[in-house]
Amino acid sequence: MARILSILVGLFFTVALAWSFGKGAYTQITEPPALTAEHEFHLHPKKVHFASDGAFGKFDRQQLQRGFQVYKEVCSACHSLSHVAFRDLAQLGYSEAEVKAIAAGFSVPGTDPNTGEATMRPGTPTDYFPKPFANDIAARAANNNAVPPDLSLMTKARHNGPAYVYSLLTGFTEQPAELLKEFPEAKTPSGLHYNPYFANLNLAMAPPLTADGQVEYGDGTKPTVDQMAKDVSAFLIWTAEPKLEKRKQTGWAVLGFLLFATILGYMSYRNIWAGKKH
Amino acid sequence: MSFPWAKEYTPAHPFMKWMDEKLPVPRLIYNAVGGGYEVPRNLNYFWNFGFLAGLCLVIQIVTGIVMAMHYAANTGVAFDTIEMTVRDVNWGWMFRYAHANGASAFFVVIYIHIFRGFYYGSYKAPREMVWLLGVVIFLLMMATAFMGYVLPWGQMSFWGAKVITGLFGAIPFVGEPLQQWLLGGFAPDNAALNRFFSLHYLLPFVILGVVILHIWALHIPGSSNPTGVEIKSESDTVPFYPYYVAKDGWAIGVFAIAFAAMVFFFPNALGHPDNYIPANPMSTPAHIVPEWYFWPFYAILRAFTQDFFFIPAKLMGVLAMFGAILVWFFLPWLDKSPVRSGSYRPTYKKFFWFGLIPAMAVLFYCGGAPAAEPYVMFSQIAGLYYFAHFLIILPVVSAIEKPLPLPYSITEAVLGKDEGAELAPSA
C-alpha cells in the first residue's frame, strides 16, 4: 500500500516534469531564442595583475597613493567612497600631518557652532569621505538619470572586480560595425557610452580617463590612461578590503599551526589504532 | 545502547564521586563520547562527518554571537554595521568571513553526512528516529541559513528574501495574506529584517537541542557501520575514547586546514558579488540566486515551467521543492531491503552512483545557473530522476534485488573470520 502510494506520488512529480520538459524542448526547437547584442558582444574583463594578488600578495603603497590621487582628482567628482574615512589613508603610507592636510582639503557637512545651522566645514581625519551629491535625486539629475555607485566596495561587488574596474575604465570604444549590422536596434542611445565590459554594453558614465597626463604623479610614474586605470583599480582593492594583507599573513600562520597539529593528530591516531585491524 | 561489555564509569577522585552522586554529567559524557560508548571498529572516514557537523554548529554559534554584538537589525544601517565590523572591529573581518564560510562548511559536511546515510542505509530500523531528527536538523539549518543571508541587507539578501517569501504566495487562497503576515508587510522591510534576526539567533539553539536528541536517539541502537551488520560481540567494537576521539581529532585537523584556506585566502569565492551592493528595492539584479547550498532545490523549483492540469506551475515548483526534502522523512519505509549497506546491494548501488549522484550534481550546477535554456531542461531531467529515484526506483529495487551475502559479523568482515560464527546456528 505504502509502495503504491509512493509510486503514485513519484509519478505525479515525474510526469509533471516530463510535461514541462516536453513543452520547453518543443518551444526551444520551434522558436529558438533570438540572440542579443549583449550575448554576443559582452566581454569578460582583461587579464591584469596587481601586487595584492595571490596568497603572498601585498599592496604596492606607492601605487595606492597614485590610485588615491586619481580617485580624488577624477572619480570623486561623481562617486562617493562612503565606507572609507580620512584616517584610513594612514595605511597608504601618509604621515599624520599629510592625512590632516588631505582631510582639510575636503569640505564636509557640519553644524555652525554659533547658530546651529547646517554648514560646511573642512574635514578632519575622523570624517568619512563626503558624498558628491546630497541624495540620489540630485545624483540622477546631474548624471543623465543614472546614480554613480559608491566605490568603497566596487572591487568586491563585481565578478572579478579589480580586473572589471580596470577593463571598464580602459574599454570605452566606438560601437563595432558588425554589432550595428547584426542588431541595428541596439545602437547606443544618445547620452550613453558604448563599453563591451559593461553588462548591457551601454553605460551612462562618460569615459573618465581620456588623455595621458590627466593627473600629474609626484613619484615620476608616467600617467598613461592604462597606468591611471590600473592605479585606481589597485586603490579600490584597498578600499574594498583594507585588511587584505593582514588576512593573508594571518592565514599562513594559522595554516602552519594547523598543519603541525594535524600531523601530531595523525601520528597519535596511528599510534592508538596500531595493532587494531579495522 | 550500552553493550554488556561496555566499561562502566568509575570515578576515582572523591570530588568526582561526589559529583557523580549529585549530578552525573561526567558519567553522561563518559557514556556518550568516552570510554563507555562502544562503537563498531570498522567505521570509515565517512563516519567522521557527524562529529564535524557538531563542530560546525559550535563555530557558527561562537562566531555568530560575536557578529551579533556589532550588528544592528535596521534596514537603514544593517549593511553599514557589517562593513564597520569588518573594517573597524579588531579581528572583525575574521569573524565575518568565518561565519559566512562557516555556513558553507556546515552544509558541505552535512551533505556528505546525509549522502553517507543514503548509501549505507543508515536511516533503516532501528535508527529511523535518528534519521527523522536529522532531516529536522537539515530543515532548521536551511531556515537559519536563509535568514542569516538576509541580515547583511545587500542586494541578494533583499531579492532572495523577496523570492523565497514570495513562494508562500503560491499557496492557494491563504498564500498572499500568509506571505504578508510572515514579512510583516508587503515586501521585505524593517519588520522582516528584525524578525529574521530574532529567529536567526534563536534557531541555532533549537538546532542544538535537536542535535542532542539526534545523538541520544543514536546511542540507543549505537552507531551503524559500513557493512550494515549489527554489533554481535565485543570483538566488533572499540570504545569511543580513545579510538574515535583520535580518529575524529585528526579529521578535525584536515577539516580545519580546508576551512582556514577558504576563510583566509578565498573568503568571497562562495558568496555573490551583488551582496556587496546595499539592498535596493528599485533595482532587480540580473540573476537572483540563493547561496550554493540551496541550488539543487532552487533548480527543482524552477524546473516546473508548465501548469499541470489545474495546478499552476509556480505551485508545482513550490510543492516539489519542499517535497524533495520531505520525501527523506519516508525513506525508512520506502526502502524495503532487508540489507542495510549499499556495499551489499548491487542494483541499488548502481542507481546511487550512476543515478542519484549525477542527478544531484546537475541540480547543483543548474540551480546556480541563469533561468535559461539549456539549464532548465537539464534540471527537468535531473529533477525527474530525483523524484523517480526515491519514490519509484527505491521501493521497487529494494523489493526485487538480490543482495550479496553478508559477513557474519563486523569481526569477520575485518579479520576474515569470527570464532563466534562457528558457535552460532547457521542462518
Image (cartoon, rainbow, N blue to C red):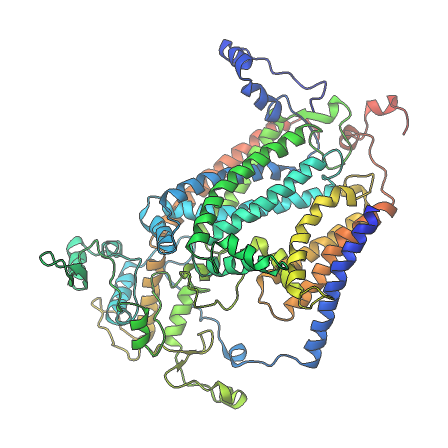
Rendered location of residue A70, percent (x, y): 27, 69
The residue at the point 65 percent across, 70 percent down is B374
Where, by quadrant of the figure, is residue B49 drawn?
A: top right
Name, please, the residue furthest toward the left. A114
Rendered location of residue A203, percent (x, y): 40, 77
**A152 displayed left or right of A220:** right
Can I make out residue B151 in this image? Answer: no
Along the line of sight, the residue nearer the viewer: A63 or A6: A6
Along the line of sight, the residue nearer the viewer: B128 or A255: B128
Name, please, the residue furthest toward the right. B426
Q: Is residue A230 above or below residue A192?
A: above
**B211 displayed left or right of A221:** right
Rendered location of residue A209, percent (x, y): 31, 76
Name, please, the residue furthest toward the top. B14
Rendered location of residue A262, percent (x, y): 52, 36
Q: Quadrant of the C terminus of chain B?
A: top right
**A57 displayed left or right of B55:** left
Q: Is residue A52 above or below residue B410?
A: below
The residue at the point 83 percent across, 38 percent down is B338
Can I make out residue B248 in this image? Answer: yes
Q: Quadrant of the N terminus of chain B?
A: top right
The residue at the point 57 percent across, 40 percent down is B53
